[in-house]
Amino acid sequence: MEEPLTLQGLNSMVRAAVSEALPSRYWVTGELSEVRETTAGHCYIELVQRDEATGEIVAKARGTIWARIYSLLRPCFLEETGQPFAMGLKVLLQVTVGFHEFYGYALDVCNIDPTYTVGEMARRRQIIIKQLTDEGVIDLNKELPFPLLPQHIAVISSPTAAGYGDFCDQLLGNRYGFVFYPHLFPSPMQGNGVEQGIIAALDRIAADIDMWDVVIIIRGGGATSELSCFDTYDLANNCAQFPLPIITGIGHQRDESVLDIVAHTRAKTPTAAAELLIHAMLEQSIFVGNMMQGIADAVARRMESEQQRVHSLLNRLPLSAALFMQGQKARMQSYVRLLGSSAAMFVKEQQHRFDVWQGILDAAAPERILSLGYSITRINGKAVRSPDDVAPGDEVVTTVAGGKFTSTVEDKKQKR
């Protein structure tokens, strides 16, 4: 049996083998899953590779950027990419491969190519923009009508941000005296909590949606490197589909975030966002002023026209009155003549009707009927109309043309 190796001895052999097999510097791509800076200025990283289909980690390695190199690479990376060297970024690193008896396999980072990270960031932004476009939501917020009088403003910002103070000062100090009612919905504006903070603020605004005219997301100032927190899909999707117009004033004139792209309107700074609202109010003030002036002019023209009409009527009144009186007099005379003629005709017609009725009444008079040989027999003052009205022995009175006589009923016969 050969003499066994110690673990240190075996690791030394591995170290020598690795050094001999991989003697050069190599460019390697990966995702930063951990970045830790030490007080001494060193930076310890963990680099991973993920399966593009599943997202599962398929490779992992530790790495070190020593303070002397990191102090040069970090500001260069920040300037080129606009991002701090932080976890979640995809990077292209130049490394040497090493193996230590105690610490094991590790990479020593010699250089960083920031252009690769810039490309990956742009690619990720383009993927988000394409997804929002394919889903048909990227322009939804832009299509909302902007409020005519944007006075009630839901502001999403950090309460300590200078940009928030500038925004409120600009609104309250506007030279036109317009009144605004801004209300702060606090949210982090940098770091990992930005996405969740803004979405939570939007949810609180949506709970009382009728209270607000417009939403303002402002940040103001800060490093361009902190812009990536506004380039997430969930944040952009929430803002794109929010039912109120969203104005962004994140304070980056050069760069445009995905949030800026989906917002209704992008302002360069918080102060510019306030000016946009003031200008909207000014436009309506001018419009209303023009309308009021137009109404006043129309009323003045109408009053002048009516005044001229009244003067014309007053001038024509004496002649019109004379003509009217003359016409009424002629009509009255005509009515008098017509009334006399009508009254005479009416009297004549009524006299004729009276004569006709008088003849009818005379023909039906009892005296005339009796003179024709008719008589009226009564019993107890009542006319006898039927044999049933009398009985044998009854006394009846018979009236004839010359007088009356009394009779006693001896017998009666019914008409057959």
Image: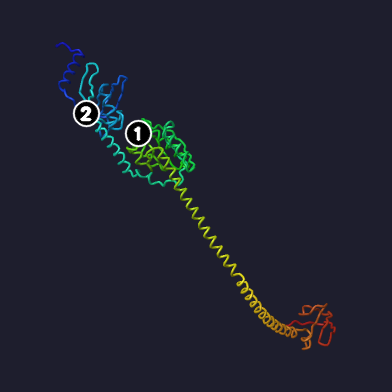
Disc 2 is placed on an element classified as strand
Residue 324: name its quadrant: bottom right
Horizontal side, residue 346 vs residue 89: left or right? right
Residue 415: name its quadrant: bottom right
Q: Which mark is residue 28?
A: 2
Disc 1 is placed on an element classified as helix
Distance, label 2 to label 1, CA atoms, is: 26 Å
Rendered view: 291 above or below 44: below
Residue lying at 47% horizontally and 52% vertically, measured from the top left = 290
Horizontal side, residue 381 vs residue 336: left or right? right
In front here: 395 or 39? 39
Q: Label 2 sits on what residue type? A: Val
Rendered view: 61 above or below 11: below
For the rendered model, the colour scheme is rainbow
Residue 344 drawn at (x, y percent): 69, 82
In front here: 225 or 275? 275
To which residue does mark 1 refer? 229
> Is residue 73 something one can see in this rendering?
yes
Residue lying at 33% horizontally and 41% vertically, measured from the top left = 132
Residue 86: name its quadrant: top left
Name the quadrant of the N terminus. Answer: top left
In front here: 194 or 391? 194
> Is residue 416 something one can see in this rendering?
no
State yes or no: discs 2 and 1 in contact (Cβ < 8 Å). no
Q: Label 1 sits on what residue type? A: Cys
Residue 305 drawn at (x, y percent): 53, 63
Please tell me which of labels 2 and 1 falls first in the chain: 2
Residue 197 drawn at (x, y percent): 40, 33
